[in-house]
Image: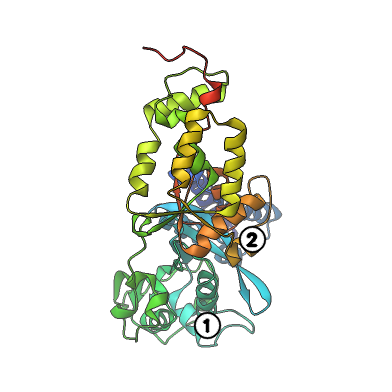
């Protein structure tokens, strides 16, 4: 390839990378967790191409090995999802060894894990048959890792659905093998083609085009391919995802207990207070009352709270509650069953303590997790921090309200 032509291709590839960054900055993904990591990876690819151009050591292989094509496929597919995060790490144990995987797209409130694969479909098939380089991992190896990890990272008490999206398509025989491993396939299903060239075995950025290959655009699972269905408990596409309203047990966090009995949520939001935070919460309460939301969600459900939560709530009430708040506390606790602290294994072992992840929260949310109960809470800081560590809890989030009765300015309630 002539140097002048090669230089033009390098410039085009660099421009495509710049366009990717602009696309991210102008999309809803700009505020999604992990997008900064993706942006950084794209910049690294651009910088490599620019450095290679300046050195005048450009080769066609440099264009083939860049991951910009893969990042474009990832971004395009992410734009089609209710995306929660990008490039998020999850941990699991294989025997005694702690392992991790990086999920390209986490979507639908953690219920879908999507891996985007943009390699040549014929190369994927050949590598899976052992024709790759020594030690090269195949997509089948990756599938087993993802499923194993998903089984240890429940969302709404079920394993997330693992989806492999093939932006360049996948041959039917390999798709069958993946579905046997409980992977949902997204992308074009191509008829198998045994002919493969050395170039086809190449890089993540290889393009696939074969006018003789018939294809169909699908997202399919076991019953749609020529293969027996694996354990139905492992195939999320065969199950109805649990709805928050379908879980019969609610685990009340301290923030829920406080909000429920607060004077703010029981007609006292018209008062003025000596604390700016309470004045702010009073304004919020007038706009969006919390107690009717909680009452509606509590209806027909069993209310529980663990010992740690009850003890913390009781300490707050003893020190801050007014007489009406104390009365409401007694009424509420008569409806709540106190259960022993019993956090789930993943809450105890997967979460590292930091500014937002406190031991008390691990116990409270972990106990709800162990009971397969939805935890009602206003502690969104903990939920975000746990999510960043790859742990999703089944929760019902509401606005925060503090105890307020003793902070009311006398005669501040307008008539």
Marks 2/1: CA distance? 28 Å
Residue 152 percent across, percent down from the top left: 54, 70
Looking at the picture, tell me which residue is in the foreground, 114 or 165: 114
Q: Are marks 2 and 1 in contact (CB under 8 Å)?
A: no
Residue 42 percent across, percent down from the top left: 58, 53
> For the residue labelled by badge 2, is the local secondary structure a helix, a strand or a loop?
loop
Quadrant the C terminus occupies:
top left
Q: Is residue 79 left or right of residue 88?
A: left
Q: Residue furthest right?
A: 55
Q: Tell me the crowding category of disc 1: few under 14, some 14 to 19, or many 20 or more residues within 10 angstroms, Cα based.
A: some
Looking at the picture, tell me which residue is in the foreground, 130 or 401: 401
Which comes sooner in the sequence, label 2 or label 1?
Answer: 2
Residue 58: mark: 2
Residue 164 percent across, percent down from the top left: 44, 69
Residue 46 appears in the rendering:
no
Q: Tell me the crowding category of disc 2: few under 14, some 14 to 19, or many 20 or more residues within 10 angstroms, Cα based.
A: some
Residue 208: mark: none
Look at the picture and state if 120 lies above or below 20: below
Residue 168 appears in the rendering:
yes
Looking at the picture, tell me which residue is in the foreground, 98 or 54: 98
Q: Is residue 403 left or right of residue 221?
A: right
Look at the picture and state if 127 lies above or below 92: below
Which residue is denoted by mark 1 in the rendering?
127
Residue 220 percent across, percent down from the top left: 33, 72
Residue at 37% from the left image edge and 59% from the top image edge: 248
> For the residue labelled by badge 1, is the local secondary structure a helix, a strand or a loop?
helix
């Amino acid at each position: 390839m002539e140097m002048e032509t090669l230089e033009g291709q390098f410039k085009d590839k660099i421009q495509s990378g710049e366009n990717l960054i602009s696309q991210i900055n102008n999309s809803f993904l700009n505020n999604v967790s992990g997008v900064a990591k993706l942006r950084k990876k794209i910049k690294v690819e651009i910088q490599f191409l620019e450095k290679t151009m300046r050195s005048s050591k450009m080769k066609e292989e440099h264009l083939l090995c860049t991951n910009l094509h893969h990042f474009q496929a990832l971004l395009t597919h992410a734009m089609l999802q209710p995306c929660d995060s990008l490039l998020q790490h999850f941990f699991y144990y294989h025997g005694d060894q702690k392992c991790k995987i990086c999920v390209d797209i986490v979507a639908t409130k953690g219920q879908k894990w999507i891996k985007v694969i943009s390699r040549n479909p014929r190369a994927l098939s050949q590598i899976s048959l052992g024709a790759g380089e020594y030690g090269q991992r195949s997509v089948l190896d990756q599938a087993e890792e993802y499923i194993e990890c998903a089984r240890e990272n429940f969302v709404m008490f079920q394993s997330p659905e693992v989806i492999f999206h093939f932006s360049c398509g996948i041959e039917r025989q390999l798709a069958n093998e993946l579905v046997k491993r409980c992977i949902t396939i997204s992308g074009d299903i191509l008829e198998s083609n045994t002919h493969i060239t050395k170039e086809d075995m190449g890089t993540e950025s290889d393009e696939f085009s074969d006018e003789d290959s018939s294809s169909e655009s699908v997202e399919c699972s076991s019953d749609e391919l020529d293969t027996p269905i694996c354990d139905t408990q492992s195939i999320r596409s065969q199950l109805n995802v649990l709805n928050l309203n379908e879980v019969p047990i609610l685990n009340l966090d301290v923030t829920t207990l406080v909000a429920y009995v607060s004077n703010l949520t029981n007609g006292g939001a018209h008062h003025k207070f000596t604390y700016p935070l309470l004045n702010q919460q009073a304004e919020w309460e007038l706009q969006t009352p919390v107690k009717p939301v909680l009452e509606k969600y509590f209806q027909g459900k069993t209310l529980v709270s663990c010992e740690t939560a009850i003890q913390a709530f009781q300490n707050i009430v003893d020190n801050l509650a007014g007489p009406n708040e104390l009365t409401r506390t007694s009424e509420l606790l008569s409806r709540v069953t106190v259960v022993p602290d019993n956090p789930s294994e993943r809450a105890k072992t997967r979460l590292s303590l930091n500014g937002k992840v406190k031991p008390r929260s691990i116990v409270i949310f972990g106990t709800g997790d162990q009971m397969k109960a939805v935890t009602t809470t206003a502690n969104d800081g903990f939920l975000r921090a746990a999510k960043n560590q790859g742990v999703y809890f089944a929760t019902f989030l509401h606005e925060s309200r503090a105890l307020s009765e003793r902070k009311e300015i006398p005669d501040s309630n307008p008539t």
